[in-house]
Amino acid sequence: AVDIPCAAFRSGGSNPRIEWKFQRGSSLGLIYYGGELTEPYRNRVQFSRTSIRFQSVTREDSGKYICEVVGDGNQIAKSEVNLIVQGEATTVPVPCPHPRPLSLAMSLSPMPGPGFVPVPGPCP
């Protein structure tokens, strides 16, 4: 599984509106909108207020994941994660030491066997 964090989410607010978008090249698609996951993500992704979790990823999942949180007073916070899938197997990225990164680059590489290996990525 691969977790993509939403650094824009701040706990303690009332009931923020959260949207997840996927950008690849000039194409922009919705992952989570109107309180529900969209197709084709409905059966592949789990949503929480702080992240989305892919059960598995492929090269087609490489791109920019954008989390937008609209809170009190219609203030918008946004965070982005660039995901690069280099093979069909997944690895688990080691989180950056920063408490709330604005963006995070992840690189996923094929594995020689079962299990997962932490892969440190560059921090912003």
Image (spheres, rainbow, N blue to C red):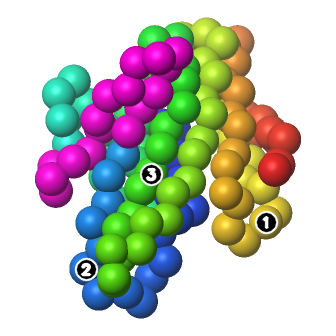
- Structural crowding at the residue carrying mark 3, measured as other residues with C-alpha within 10 Å and reported as few (<14), some (14–19) or many (≥20): many
In the image, the segment drawn in magenta is 21-36
What element does badge 1 sit on? loop
Element carrying mark 3? strand
Q: Are marks 1 and 2 in contact (CB under 8 Å)?
A: no
Q: Is residue 55 visible?
A: yes
Residue bearing mark 2: 15
Q: Residues within 10 Å of mark 1 (few under 14, many from 20)?
A: few
Horizontally, is 21 left or right of 98 in the view? left
Amino acid type at image mark 3: Cys
Image position, residue 28 (x, y; %): 38, 26
Residue where numbered disc 1 is placed: 98
Q: Position of residue 40 (x, y in %)?
A: 21, 24
- Choose top left, top right, bottom left or bottom right for residue 75: bottom left
Residue 36: percent from left, percent from top = 16, 49
Tell which of 11 and 76 is nearer to you. Answer: 76
Which of discs 1 and 2 lies nearer the camera? The answer is 2
Up the image or down, 62 lies above or below 44; here it is above
Of marks 3 and 1, the one in the foreground: 3
Spatial distance from mark 2 to mark 3, Cα to Cα?
16 Å
The answer to which of marks 1 and 2 sits earlier in the sequence is: 2
Q: Residue at x 26, y 45 (%)?
A: 32
Mark toward the start of the polypeptide (2 vs 3): 2
SS of the residue under disc 2: loop
At 15% from the left and 53% from the top, the residue drawn is 34
Instruction: Give the image location of residue 53, x and y in percent.
Output: 41, 44
Q: Amino acid at mark 2?
A: Asn
Instruction: Tell me which numbered mark, 3 or 1, is placed earlier along the sequence.
Output: 3
Q: Residue at x 72, y 71 (%)?
A: 99
